[in-house]
C-alpha cells in the first residue's frame, strides 16, 4: 500500500508537510499543496483515517442509535440520515438497541470516541439514562422522545396526526372506530393513542385492540375484528405495518375494505400507496425526519454552545381508497395544540 512517506519522497517534501497540505493547513503554499495533491492522486494515496483523526480530532462519522433496523420506516429514516450525511462528507455508523436497555447503553458507550455526533431514537432514553451513558461534550440530537429539557430533539407530531386522522374518519360518517395500539410504554404509541382518544367524542364509540407495531400484531387484530358480530365501522392502526397486517386478515376472512369496514394507518411507508386498496394514512415524511435530525446535529457540532431546541415535524392525513375516499387533498396536523398540563409518557421506539 502507498504510504504518506511515499508521497513525501515523490513530492520532495517532508512527511509533516504532506500531512499539513492534505489537512488544508494555511502554512503550506498553494503551489506546494497542488504538487503534493498531484502526487497523492497519481499514487492513489488514501490517508489513514485513524491517524488523520488523531491530528484533526474529527472522525467525520455520525452515529445513529435506533430501536430496530427492520422495516420500511427504518430504511427510509436511515436513507434520509445517510443522504444528508454524505452531502456533508460524513459517514454513518448505525447500531440498534433491539428494545433492550443494556444493549442501548453498550451501543452508546461503544460509539463515543468513534463519532463526531450522535442521533438517538430509543425507548430507554430519559434524562437519567443519557447522563449515565453519554458524555455531555458529545453533540447529540434525540428523535421521537419525551425528554423536554437539556437535549436537542426532533419529534413527529404523533398527537396531532392521530387527532387529524380520527377527525377525518368521523367526518366520513364513522361513529364506531377501533384503534390498534402500539407497544406499551412507547412514546409514539402513547401519543397516537392520546390523539385518537381526545378526538373521539360522544356519541361516537371508541374501541381498542392491542398491537405492537408489527405486521403480525395487525394481522391478529384483523382476525379479532373479522370474528366480531358487532364490527366497528372503521379501524385506525397506530402504524402502517399493523394496518397492512390487519388488511390481509380482513381480506382473508372475506371482509371487504372499505365497503364493510374502513381502514387507516400512520406513517405513509412507501408500500402504503401500492397495496389494494391503497391505504389512507397519516403521512410522516420519514426521510425528512432523518435529514432534519442530521442537519440539526451538524449545527450543534459546528456551534458548541448552541441552545438546545425541541422541534416538531408536522404530518398530514392522506386520504386513499381504504377509508372510502378515492381522492382528497392532504389534511395537515396542527402543532403545539395540546394543553400544557398534559404530561408525556416514557419515550418509545418507533415501529
Image (cartoon, rainbow, N blue to C red):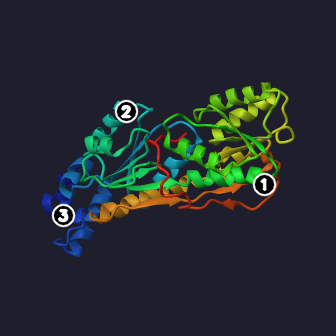
The residue pinned by badge 2 equals 101
Looking at the figure, which quarter contains the C terminus? top right
Q: Secondary structure at mark 3?
A: helix
Among the two numbered marks 1 and 2 on one chain, the one whose residue lies closer to the N terminus? 2
| Closer to the camera in the image, 178 or 198 | 198
Q: Secondary structure at mark 2?
A: helix
Instruction: Please say if 194 is above or below 12.
Output: above
Tell me if label 3 and label 2 are in contact, CB under 8 Å: no
Per the model, the C-alpha gap separating discs 1 and 2 is 42 Å
Among the two numbered marks 3 and 2 on one chain, the one whose residue lies closer to the N terminus? 3
Residue 206 is situated, as x and y percent measured from the top left of the image, at 70, 40
Residue 299 is situated, as x and y percent measured from the top left of the image, at 36, 64
Mark 2 residue crowding within 10 angstroms, few (<14) / some (14–19) / many (20+): some
Residue at horizontal 32%, vertical 58%? 42
Looking at the figure, which quarter contains the N terminus? top left
In this figure, what is the number of numbered marks?
A: 3
Residue 85 visible in the shown view: no
Mark 1 residue crowding within 10 angstroms, few (<14) / some (14–19) / many (20+): few
Residue at horizontal 29%, vertical 38%? 110
Instruction: Please say if 338 is above or below 224.
Output: below
Amino acid at each position: 500500500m502507498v504510504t504518506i512517506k511515499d508521497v513525501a519522497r515523490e513530492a520532495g517534501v517532508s512527511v509533516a508537510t504532506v500531512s499539513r497540505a492534505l489537512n488544508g493547513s494555511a502554512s503550506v503554499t498553494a503551489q506546494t499543496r497542488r504538487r503534493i495533491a498531484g502526487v497523492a492522486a497519481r499514487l492513489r494515496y488514501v490517508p489513514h483515517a485513524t491517524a488523520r483523526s488523531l491530528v484533526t480530532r474529527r472522525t467525520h462519522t455520525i452515529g445513529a442509535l435506533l430501536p430496530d433496523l427492520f422495516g420500511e420506516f427504518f430504511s427510509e429514516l436511515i436513507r434520509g440520515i445517510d443522504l444528508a450525511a454524505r452531502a456533508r462528507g460524513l459517514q454513518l455508523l448505525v447500531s440498534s438497541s433491539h428494545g433492550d436497555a443494556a444493549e442501548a447503553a453498550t451501543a452508546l458507550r461503544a460509539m463515543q470516541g468513534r463519532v463526531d455526533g450522535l442521533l438517538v431514537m430509543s425507548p430507554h432514553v430519559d434524562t437519567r439514562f443519557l447522563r449515565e451513558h453519554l458524555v455531555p461534550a458529545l453533540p447529540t440530537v434525540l428523535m421521537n422522545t419525551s425528554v423536554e429539557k437539556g437535549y436537542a430533539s426532533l419529534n413527529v407530531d404523533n398527537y396531532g396526526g392521530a387527532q387529524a386522522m380520527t377527525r377525518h374518519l368521523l367526518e366520513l360518517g364513522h361513529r364506531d372506530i377501533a384503534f390498534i395500539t402500539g407497544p406499551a410504554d412507547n412514546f409514539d404509541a402513547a401519543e397516537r393513542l392520546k390523539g385518537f382518544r381526545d378526538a373521539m367524542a360522544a356519541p361516537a364509540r371508541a374501541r381498542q385492540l392491542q398491537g405492537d407495531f408489527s405486521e403480525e400484531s395487525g394481522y391478529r387484530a384483523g382476525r379479532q375484528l373479522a370474528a366480531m358480530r358487532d364490527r366497528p365501522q372503521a379501524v385506525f392502526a397506530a402504524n402502517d405495518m399493523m394496518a397492512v397486517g390487519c388488511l390481509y386478515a380482513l381480506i382473508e376472512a372475506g371482509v371487504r375494505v372499505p365497503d364493510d369496514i374502513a381502514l387507516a394507518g400512520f406513517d405513509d411507508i412507501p408500500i402504503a400507496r401500492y397495496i389494494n386498496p391503497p391505504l389512507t394514512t397519516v403521512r410522516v415524511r420519514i426521510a425528512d425526519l432523518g435529514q432534519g435530525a442530521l442537519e440539526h446535529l451538524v449545527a450543534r457540532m459546528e456551534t458548541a454552545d448552541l441552545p438546545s431546541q425541541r422541534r416538531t415535524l408536522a404530518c398530514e392525513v392522506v386520504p386513499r381508497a381504504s377509508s372510502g375516499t378515492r381522492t382528497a387533498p392532504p389534511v395537515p396536523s396542527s402543532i403545539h395544540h395540546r394543553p400544557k398540563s398534559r404530561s408525556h409518557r416514557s419515550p418509545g421506539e418507533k415501529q
